[in-house]
């Protein structure tokens, strides 16, 4: 296979592998630095799905697939409890639910989120972390959790407004 295609796939798979950490850190920094209450709600949802996944893995005594590890060494592998398609499915379902509830459907955002989810599913299958069925089921679980979580927090989430900073407010 062409070296350029392999390089592109490798970079893309690495980016997808880092997506959950990026989402969690972005939500955390937005919450801490800008006191963004909506980011707090989203961060709590991410923590919730990681907790549910960790509990599921503990109960079922699931092992970590070497291809799913964030950090690999000769002796150990470190991976997040939730599969990446579950985290991305949660995010996509949460934002699409918000668009549908507020009746602010943005087609570019909608198709971008769906493409992002499909790209994540493809990436996890491509690196051998999940089979197609595993990856799709993890996405569906994330979507169900995202819609359910949004329905629980929607009243509070939609009552919050983003702060509008003016140039004079910045010191």
Image (tube, rainbow, N blue to C red):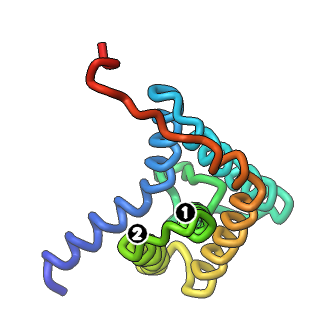
Residue 26 is situated, as x and y percent measured from the top left of the image, at 45, 42
Residue 51 is situated, as x and y percent measured from the top left of the image, at 74, 50
Above or below: residue 156 compared with residue 35: below
Instruction: Inspect this view and state whether residue 123 appears.
Output: no
The residue at the far top in this view is: 171
Above or below: residue 141 compared with residue 23: below
Q: Residues within 10 Å of mark 1 (few under 14, many from 20)?
A: some
- Report, in whole angstroms, how far the alpha carbon at label 1 lies from the one at label 2: 9 Å
Residue 60 is situated, as x and y percent measured from the top left of the image, at 83, 65
The reply to whether the C-beta atoms of the residues labelled 1 and 2 are less than 8 Å apart is yes
Residue found 56% across the figure and 77% down from its top: 130
Q: Decide which of 134, 61 is in the foreground and name it.
A: 134
The quadrant the C terminus occupies is: top left
**In the picture provided, is 139 more to the left or to the right than 163?**
right
N-terminal of the pair, mark 1 or mark 2, is 1
The residue at the far right in this view is: 59
> Residue under circle 1?
95
Q: Residues within 10 Å of mark 2 (few under 14, many from 20)?
A: some
Tell me the element at label 1: helix
Residue found 54% across the figure and 49% down from its top: 75
Residue found 50% across the figure and 67% down from its top: 104
Tell me the element at label 2: helix
The quadrant the N terminus occupies is: bottom left
**Rendering quarter of residue 15:** bottom left
Above or below: residue 80 compared with residue 101: above
Mark carried by residue 109:
2
Q: Decide which of 94, 124 is in the foreground and name it.
A: 94
């Amino acid at each position: 296979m062409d070296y350029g295609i392999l390089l592109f796939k490798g970079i893309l798979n690495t980016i997808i592998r880092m997506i959950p950490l990026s989402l969690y850190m972005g939500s955390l920094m937005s919450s801490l630095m800008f006191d963004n209450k909506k980011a707090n709600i989203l961060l709590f949802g991410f923590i919730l799905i990681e907790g549910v996944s960790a509990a599921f893995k503990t109960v079922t005594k699931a092992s970590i697939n070497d291809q799913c590890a964030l950090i690999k060494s000769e002796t150990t592998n470190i991976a997040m409890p939730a599969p990446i398609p579950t985290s991305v499915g949660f995010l996509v379902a949460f934002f699409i639910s918000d668009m549908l509830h507020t009746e602010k459907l943005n087609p570019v955002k909608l198709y971008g989120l769906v493409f992002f989810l499909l790209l994540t599913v493809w990436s996890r299958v491509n690196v051998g972390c999940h089979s197609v069925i595993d990856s799709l089921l993890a996405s569906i679980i994330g979507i169900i959790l995202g819609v359910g979580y949004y329905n629980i927090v929607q009243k509070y989430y939609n009552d919050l407004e983003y702060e509008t900073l003016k140039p004079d407010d910045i010191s």
